[in-house]
Amino acid sequence: MCDTGHAHDHGAFGFLVDTPEVRTLIDEARRQMDGFADYPDRVEALKSAFAQLLASDGWLPDDFAMPDSASRMGGGIGQYALYRAEDGSLCLFSLVVPAGASTPVHDHLAWGVVGVYRGEQRETVYRRLDDGSDETRAELEISREQSLRPGDLYALIPPTDDIHYVKTVSDTASISIHLLANDTACVWRHKFDPDSGIVTPFRSGYANAPCVE
Ligand SMILES: [Fe+2]
């Protein structure tokens, strides 16, 4: 632990939270990325290691489990890098969504696995009806909604399961853990307004680590 206890004093890449639980999941993710070419197979093979992390206590420091008043997502939502590959091939982060707050509707542009660690979330997934050729507009309709409690997992697999938002429905903030095959918070991705169809470039940023230009 650093002298001040602030998460941002740690390095920008590698294990920003260096515990056996986090290392075990990242090692397993690397193994499955080498072992399976298809994203759904990787996700399936990773589920048990991910479930173990969600079932473990004491590995997520308080600095990575608090709202962020300076959030670029709004609503006090905190996004904290736990692990970042320097080559942008993999990251693990925590997402802290205060009670009643929602993320924007957004995409991820990479496959991944998400699990709820604390609190409860409602996830709303959208399907895209247009062909995606216009960068500034999208026609979306809701394809699925699900309630998620601690230990529940879901996959993000572009292009069909990549656009969603989550809302905290518990009385306390929810914390979800996200493993994705990019450097999610530093990638320029998209925010969607399903009512107007407007698409906006979006880079959420980590609260505890800078994006390299
Ligand atoms: Fe997301």
Image (spheres, rainbow, N blue to C red):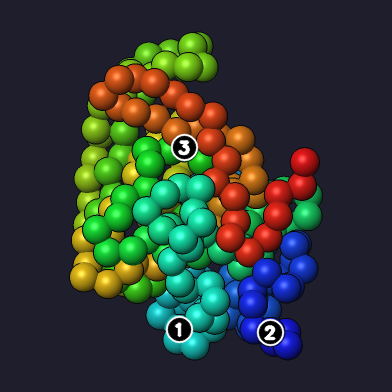
Q: CA distance from mark 1 to mark 2?
A: 26 Å
Which numbered circle lies on residue 94?
Answer: none
Residue 183: image location, x then y, percent: 65, 49
Residue at 47% x, 73% y is 65
Lower position in the chain sequence, tag 1 or tag 2:
2
Residue at 34% x, 20% y is 197
**Which amino acid, by three-letter code, is at mark 1?**
Ser
Q: Residue furthest front?
A: 69
Residue identified by numbered label 3: 107
Q: Which element is circle 2 on? A: loop
Q: Is mark 3 within 8 Å of ligand 1?
A: yes
Residue 38: image location, x then y, percent: 56, 42
| Total numbered labels placed on residues in the image | 3
Query: Does residue 61 appear to the left or right of 87 in the view shown?
Result: left
Residue 59's place in the image compared with 149, above or below, is below
**Which amino acid, by three-letter code, is at mark 2?**
Thr
Mark 1 vs mark 3: give the one in front. Answer: 3
Question: Which quadrant is home to the C terminus?
Answer: top right
Residue 21: image location, x then y, percent: 58, 80
Query: Residue 126's quadrant in the figure?
Result: top left
Q: Which element is circle 3 on? A: loop
Which numbered circle lies on residue 56?
Answer: 1
Mark 2 vs mark 3: give the one in front. Answer: 2
Residue 168: image location, x then y, percent: 28, 59
**Which amino acid, by three-letter code, is at mark 3?**
Asp
Say whether marks 1 and 2 touch (CB < 8 Å): no
Q: Residues within 10 Å of mark 1 (few under 14, many from 20)?
A: few
| 119, 116: nearer the viewer | 119
Lower position in the chain sequence, tag 1 or tag 3:
1
Q: CA distance from mark 1 to mark 3?
A: 28 Å
Residue 136's place in the image compared with 60, above or below, is above
Q: Residues within 10 Å of mark 2 (few under 14, many from 20)?
A: few
